[in-house]
Amino acid sequence: MSSSKPSSKKPLDLPAVKLPREIKVLVAAAFMIAIGFGIVAPVLPQFAQSFDVSVSAAAVVVSAFAFTRLIFAPLSGWLVERMGERRTYILGILIVAASSAACAFAQNYWQLLLYRGLGGIGSTMFTVAAMGLLIKMAPPAARGRVSSLYSGSFLLGNIAGPAVGGLLAGLGMQLPFLVYACALVLVALLVATQLPAVSALSRRTGAAAGAGGVGAAGATAARKKDALPLRVALGLPAYRAVLASGFANGWSAFGIRMALVPLFATTALGAGSEVAGISLAVFAIGTGVALTFSGKLADTWGRKPMIIAGLAVNGIAMGVLGFTGNEFWFFAVSAIAGLGSGLMGPAQQATVADVIGNERSGGKVLATFQMSSDLGAIIGPIAAGILVDSFSYGPAFLMATAVAFVAVLLWLPAKDTKLLPQS
């Protein structure tokens, strides 16, 4: 498939773009992974506390997963360029499966902390590899739609998983970990059997890995030769801007939402824990609604307007959230914040895909983008907690607004990557 510049008529042809079967395989795998993660999430803190540790120690077990994801993201990028996306994906999934199974048999707190932390290594491996596979297989004119579809499958799994996990926990807190491990083994089998060793897209474009009967070593060499250097990507204003918006989204959607919103519901609003749970679900619903159209709009209107709109909506809503005084407005603003996150998500991934292109690898570029989100998810709750202790919840939520608008400022001078020649 030859490279071509997008024409003004291309958005009108968007519905006719057919998605490769392999993308549907990855979407199904994402749903299974998300359900498994959701099954474990509500049980993990309780399981940690069963070893007679403090609440803060139990929270460290949760944070250990995100911390190792951040630390080992550069290694994942290197592995993608060295081994290829498919093998890195399968290996990462199996590492998380082994980690989850080991957690079920942990005999003390420190074993649980170690096993859970090791799972973060595998998690960042398959996350970066999955992004690389989607970039290679997604038609350039449908990158936003593919990102939206993939993100939506994860979201649905995350919504369904906790409900299943709650039921399984009644049969023993070890069971959810074993179910998660089994689900991941099934995912590894699905990807190993349903995804070709060399993507059909690479063969169609005449990549060296697929042309002329080149073996695995030749495919690896081709990937290494064609890998986009991180320094080149960092030279692009749009890539630097997407790192900033990824950091802001991680700070808000994965950090503040998970760590501060439940505490605000129970402490500031004086509501029960069920209200905190509902607020998280409402945020997810808002994100899900946005994903039904944001991917297509990213492919038609462009990446930049969707990211700026998402940052503005999410940032303003998160700032307002800290000043809501009753449950109605708390839920309403949570939904709007989720809508903003869903508006920018597909456009961000599409921007990274535009930078890398279909015909080359970009493991380090992908890993750095993933790290920006993880870093925001780690720093956000810590900074917000300090502000709450020193002042109140209002300034802590307003900090998320400030971070979002700093990202907007970086996006304003950047050129929309959809306007660049697509490959």
Image (tube, grey):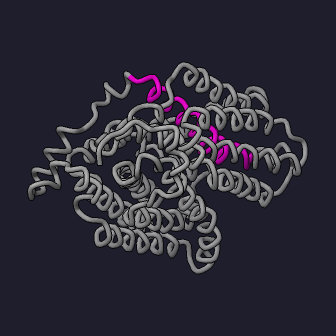
Q: List x then y, in percent, for residue 51.
A: 54, 61
In the image: residue 389, left or right of residue 345: right
Q: Let me know if residue 382 appears in the view.
A: no
Q: Let me know if residue 27 appears in the view.
A: yes
In the image: residue 188, left or right of residue 70: left
Instruction: Give the magenta-colored segment's residue range.
Output: 236-263
Q: Residue furthest bottom?
A: 171
The residue drawn where x is 55% and y is 48% is: 12
Q: Residue furthest front?
A: 9
Q: Is residue 394 above or below residue 122?
A: above
The residue drawn where x is 59% and y is 38% is: 301
Report how many numbered discs are placed on residues in the image: 0
Between 88 and 420, which is closer to the camera in this rendering? Answer: 420
Q: Main secondary structure of the magenta part?
A: helix
The residue drawn where x is 71% and y is 58% is: 281
Between 311 and 333, which is closer to the camera in this rendering? Answer: 311
Between 293 and 286, which is closer to the camera in this rendering? Answer: 293
Q: Is residue 292 magenta?
A: no
In the image: residue 278, left or right of residue 188: right
Q: Is residue 262 magenta?
A: yes
Q: Is residue 23 above or below residue 261?
A: below
Q: List x then y, in percent, for residue 342.
A: 63, 47
Q: Quadrant of residue 411?
A: top right
Quadrant occupied by the C terminus: top left
Q: List x then y, in percent, for residue 393.
A: 77, 34
Q: Is residue 241 above or below residue 121?
A: above
Q: List x then y, in percent, for residue 72.
A: 35, 43
Between 4 and 42, which is closer to the camera in this rendering? Answer: 4
